[in-house]
Image (tube, grey):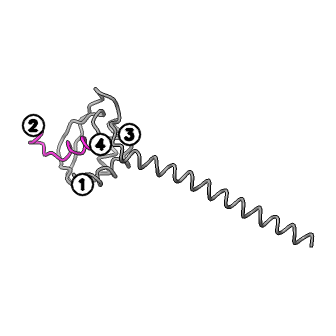
Amino acid sequence: MKEEATWSTVAALAKILITVIVVILLVIGGRMAYQFGYRVFSKQAFSDPPGKEAAITVREGETVSEIAEVLEEKGIIQDALVFCVQERLSEYRGEIEPGTYVVNSAQTPDEIIQVLTRTPSKIEE
């Protein structure tokens, strides 16, 4: 009897521990998902005006992910993954054109995407 009570107690404690761990993981995961969603939909510029300008060259066949990595490396955007999601959700999805563009860290992601969708001749006009 004493042994059964001990195992029952251990089993109950294990269930409580597992429940606590699951709740903690859900809270952490929920918080991370909220923060990611907030960054995607808030569409804030990386820095305040005047910002930092950089020339970006988009090559034929280059993916949005590769472009986003360059933008992040040059300090124009904060997070390449967030930028990729923003591009997928934008009205300019899949319209980024090859060319050389000047972008600024004070531009919103939508403004940067819009710049990258213009052909080089439209920028010069």
Give the residue drawn at x 67%, y 56%.
Answer: 20
The first of marks 1 and 2 along the sequence is 1
Kindly check if marks 1 and 2 are in contact, taking CB atoms under 8 A apart as contact: no
Q: Amino acid at mark 4?
A: Pro
Kindly check if marks 4 and 3 are in contact, taking CB atoms under 8 A apart as contact: no
Numbered label attached to residue 78: 3
Q: Which residue is mark 2?
A: 124
Q: Quadrant of residue 105?
A: top left
Q: Amino acid at mark 3?
A: Gln
**Furthest residue to the right?**
2
Q: Which residue is mark 1?
A: 93
Segment colored magenta: 110-125
Q: Give the distance between the C-alpha atoms of the residues marked 2 and 3, in whole angstroms.
A: 28 Å
Q: Is residue 62 above or below residue 74?
A: below
**Magenta region's main secondary structure?**
helix
Q: Quadrant of residue 50?
A: top left
Question: Who is closer to the viewer here, 118 or 48?
Answer: 48
Kindly check if marks 2 and 3 are in contact, taking CB atoms under 8 A apart as contact: no
Q: Amino acid at mark 1?
A: Arg
